[in-house]
Image (tube, grey):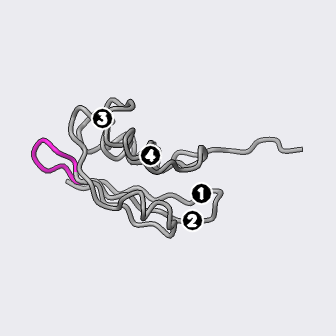
Amino acid sequence: MVTEISLNTICGHTTKIIATKEGKSTHIHIKSTCEKLRKWGTHFDMEMKDLMGGPETILGRKSAEMPLTPTCLVPAAVMNACWLENGMISKNLAREMGKMEIIFDKLE
């Protein structure tokens, strides 16, 4: 199976995350207009131990080596793609929802 997630973020960049479950690993491919993300790494594998988060995971190490802005949604989207691919989030629920949003309700 394959999970694809697209992001249009406040920074103006567009990003697509493609997750594919392959045995015990989930292969991640990131396509982005963001140069920093391309340096962060566009291809890597996530193991089950990486799916719970934390500094010792691949995302934790990547974030320490090449910090992204605190507003970058890509690490959370990578986790969501992995969780979907590994059955930890229902794909039916994700299809039903269609999208997740950050809504700026009031800005004065």
Quadrant of residue 88 within the rendered picture:
top left
Q: For mark 2, does the 10 Å Cα neighbourhood hold few (<14), some (14 to 19), or many (20 or more) residues?
A: few
**In the rendering, at what x and y percent does residue 42 appear?**
34, 62
Disc 3 residue type (three-letter): Leu
* Disc 4 to disc 3, C-alpha distance: 11 Å
Q: Main secondary structure of the magenta part?
A: strand
Disc 1 residue type (three-letter): Thr
Question: Disc 1 on helix, strand or loop?
Answer: loop
Q: For mark 3, does the 10 Å Cα neighbourhood hold few (<14), some (14 to 19), or many (20 or more) residues?
A: some
The residue to which callout 3 is attached is 51
Question: Disc 3 on helix, strand or loop?
Answer: helix
Disc 4 residue type (three-letter): Pro
The residue depicted at 31 percent of the width and 60 percent of the height is 29
The residue depicted at 34 percent of the width and 47 percent of the height is 81
**In the rendering, at what x and y percent does residue 23 appear?**
9, 46
Magenta part of the protein: which range? Answer: 20-26
The residue to which callout 4 is attached is 75
Question: Disc 4 on helix, strand or loop?
Answer: helix
Question: Disc 2 on helix, strand or loop?
Answer: loop
Q: Which residue is nearer to you in this view: 62 or 79? A: 62
Residue 13: numbered disc: 2
* Disc 2 to disc 1, C-alpha distance: 6 Å
Q: For mark 1, does the 10 Å Cα neighbourhood hold few (<14), some (14 to 19), or many (20 or more) residues?
A: some
- Label whose residue precedes the other's in the sequence (2 or 3): 2
Is the residue 67 above or below the residue 34 in the image? above
- Label whose residue precedes the other's in the sequence (3 or 1): 1
**In the rendering, at what x and y percent does residue 84 appear?**
31, 42
**Identity of the residue furthest to the right in this view:** 108
The residue to which callout 1 is attached is 9
Q: Are marks 4 and 2 in contact (CB under 8 Å)?
A: no
**In the rendering, at what x and y percent does residue 95 appear?**
39, 48
* Disc 2 to disc 3, C-alpha distance: 25 Å
